[in-house]
Every structure is written in structure tokens, then in C-alpha cells.
Image (cartoon, helix red, strand yellow):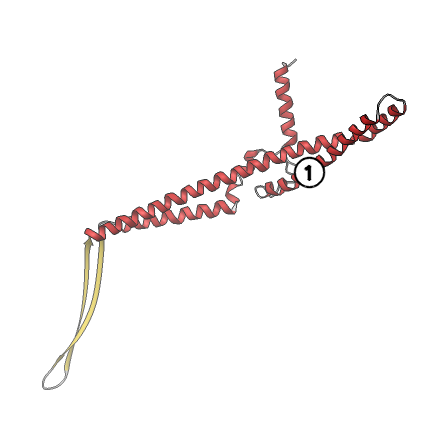
Amino acid sequence: MPSPARAAALARLALLLALAPRVAGAAPLGLADFEAGLERRGEWRLAQSAVTVAEAVAQREQGNAGLRATTSAGAGGFSEPQFPAGARDYGSLSLGVGLRWPILGSASEEELRVASARLDAVVAGARRDAERGALLRGLRESFFGYAHARQVHDLARAFLADAPRVRDVLRRRQAAGIVLEADRRRAEGAFALAERELGAADAALRARGDELRRWRPDFDGE
């Protein structure tokens, strides 16, 4: 026979499995199953694209800085008069290859551009990470909010399912003088509260279900 602590742990596990969001005809979905959909979120893709662009700009600026090769080309032509008449045409083509090294002010400007591009890449990365954290926090709120709403919904529905029998028992016992009118009113108040909780849980399930489907379109919850 399992110990009381183990029995309690098994009972909690069974409850979590029962309350976990599901895909129709599939096993329950865990939090990690929803987190796997992060890269499908538009907010994440936009933030990641900003990082890719910023890193490419930083690499380009770094490649353009410092010593680098230069090339040049030119073409020209002129005409030489001939006597007693006519002219002779000449053409020329020049090519040049060299190295350029920035000095003084131009070097400082290049260093500033490189540093600025690197900073932009770091900032874009920080914004992406912050967006990821915000998305995952929202997911956890939706996931556990759905599980809580499901628990409240099922408890309230089970409580109300027994309402007809309880009302009948109270009516007979009140007629027999065993319970008072105040007892019946308290029971009716409890049923009314359960109905309000059931309605609120239904609304929460629909809202949380819509949020979870943004992560898993195949989620078949309310």
C-alpha cells in the first residue's frame, strides 16, 4: 500500500493530467508543447528579423573599416593634327590598385560607425530576449489560467448537478420540521454562487482557450 504522501502525490498528478489542455483525440498538452510554438508568433519573428538585420549591418561596417584595397580605372582620348591636312586620334586606358588606411578624423568616424552598429545589434538582441520573456509569461498565464478555470467549472457543475436532490431532501426535511427556512435559503445561496462561478469559468475557458490557440492552432479547448 502506498504511503499517504505518495498517494497524495499520485492524486495531484492525476488531477493535473485531467485538467491539462488537450488536442482532440490526442494526449494532454503540457506547457512545453505550447512553448514549442514560440517561433510561429509574429512578435517573435519580427524581433528576430530586427536582430538579423542589425547583425548584418554591424558586420558590414566592421568589414568596411580599417585597411582595405581600392581600385580605379579611367579612359581618355585626344586628336593630333596632321599637316598639311588631317588628324590622328589616340586613346588611353589607365588602371590602378592600391590600399587605403583611414587617418585622423576619418578613422574616428569609422570607429564610431562600427561601435554604433554593434550597439544597435546588442539592443536588438536585448529587445528580442525581452519579447521572448513577455510572450512566455503570457503563455504561462494563459495555460495555468485555463487549468484553474477548468477546475472551477468542473467543481461548480458537479455541485449543481446534485442541486435537485438536495432541494428535494431539504423540502421534505423542512416539512418534517428537521431543518429551518434559513437552512434552505443558505443552500439556495450556495447554488446561486455556484451558478455565478460556473458562468465566470465558462467565460474564462473561452478567453484562455483562444489565447492558447495562438500557440497551438490544433488546441481543441473551449
Q: Is residue 3 left or right of residue 43?
A: right
Marks counted in the figure total: 1
Q: Residue furthest bottom?
A: 84
**Label 1 residue SS:** helix
Query: Could you tell me the amino acid type at mark 1?
Result: Ala
Q: Is residue 222 visible?
A: no
Most extreme residue toward the right, as rendered?
176
Q: Residue lying at the far left in this picture: please name it.
A: 83
161 vs 212, nearest the viewer: 161
- Specify whether 64 is left or right of 13: left
Q: Is residue 175 visible?
A: yes
The residue sitting at 59% across, 38% down in the picture is 142
User: At 14% across and 84% down in the image, what residue appears?
Assistant: 86
Is 138 drawn above or below residue 162 in the view shown? below
Q: Is residue 82 above or below residue 122?
A: below
Residue at image location 41% in from the left, 42% down from the top: 125
Q: Nearer the viewer, residue 167 or 107?
A: 167
Residue that mark 1 sits on = 200
Q: Which quadrant of the figure has residue 163?
A: top right
Residue 219 point in image, percent of width and height: 62, 40
Compare residues 181 and 69 and report the one nearer the observer. Answer: 181
* Position of the N terminus by quadrant: top right
Rendering coords of residue 100 (x, y %): 20, 53
Q: Is residue 182 left or right of residue 79?
A: right
Q: Is residue 207 left or right of residue 126?
A: right
